[in-house]
Amino acid sequence: MSFTFAASAYADDVTLVPKGNRNAEQPDIPGASKRRTKAGRTTFDDKYEKVRDLLANDRKLMDKIKATAREYRIDPIHMVGAIVGEHTYNVDAYDRLQSYYVKAAAYAGNTFRFAYDGVKVDEFVSRAEFSACADEKGSYDLWTCRERVWEKSFRGKTVDGVDYPNNRFSAVFFQPFYAGQTFGLGQINPLTALELSDMVSKTSGYPKLDENDANAVYEAIMDPDKSLAYMAASIRMSIDDYRRIAKMDISKNPGVTATLYNVGNSDERAARLAARNRSRGEGVAPILPEENYYGWLVNDKLAELESLL
């Protein structure tokens, strides 16, 4: 299936990242993913085939994916790749889209809040250490600023008599069930949803999210329709970050966008890649972004996945 990128005229100094994997063999799969799969008495091949069949047999879902991709000006293969990666390596797919709606409904009416050690996140980010973030206007800049402050001033440290875990901000404050848990069709964590709230509200018309209304955040990431919007926004952000910061056009490589969907922090990763390439001097071919184990699978199966569209 061909796809026309509206408003995607890249400047001459932007390097196109071609299709395909940079690594001849799949990079190592993390032990946690192997353990989850073994505990479920299944295999990665079985999980891949299950999510592939879900996509192949659910035209309603595929139509939603394509419509959402058009809204965010991305090729729908990027969304397909992210769904395949998440459900192959992180969770098992349900057999039908309706099952995701049922699962989302099961969370409705529950009372959640984002907090650590009895301190709600809105109270925590009002501390003086976060004052540098006060001037940030958009949801993405605001929450990524707060993530940086957490990493620098709190992660793994004792501050004012409180021991803070050596873990990500999203795992400590935004996942009350267990660390690392993500939700729904797009397997999005609550902090990511808060970061993307402005883009999703502007593009899809959904209400902006508030950290004080954890239930609304969970609804957004559990409901398949809303989840697809946040997934597309995340991919759009990664593509834009790499174009703007690293001067790389990754829009033709679903394995790279799937990798970034998996690991997050596309702006920081683009900045590190840009710094590496600057250090190489003029006239040297730039280092291209590489896929991880998750993105490698997407590129390896690309012809089959594209046929689903």
Image: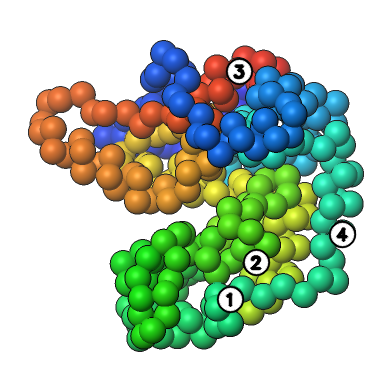
Which residue does the image show at 42% across and 80% down from the upper left? 162
Q: Looking at numbered disc 2 in the image, what kind of residue is underneath it?
A: Pro
Q: Please provide percent x and percent y for residue 97.
A: 84, 41
Query: Real-space Cα distance between discs 2 and 3?
Result: 35 Å
Query: Real-space Cα distance between discs 4 and 3?
Result: 34 Å
Q: Quadrant of the N terminus?
A: top right
- Whether pointer 1 and pointer 3 mark residues with C-beta atoms closer than 8 Å, the reply is no
- Whether pointer 2 and pointer 1 mark residues with C-beta atoms closer than 8 Å, the reply is yes
Q: Please provide percent x and percent y for residue 16.
A: 37, 27
Q: Earlier in the sequence, mark 2 or mark 3?
A: 2
Which residue does the image show at 50% across and 24% down from the upper left? 296
- Whether pointer 4 and pointer 2 mark residues with C-beta atoms closer than 8 Å, the reply is no
Q: Looking at numbered disc 4 in the image, what kind of residue is underneath it?
A: Ala
Which residue does the image show at 50% across and 34% down from the upper left? 30
Mark 4: few, some, or many residues within 10 Å (few <14, many ≥20)? few
Q: Which residue is mark 3?
A: 301
| Callout 2 secondary element | loop
Which residue does the image show at 55% across and 17% down from the upper left? 300
Q: Quadrant of the C terminus?
A: top right
Mark 1: few, some, or many residues within 10 Å (few <14, many ≥20)? some
Q: Which residue is mark 2?
A: 176
Q: Earlier in the sequence, mark 4 or mark 2?
A: 4
Q: Looking at numbered disc 3 in the image, what kind of residue is underneath it?
A: Lys
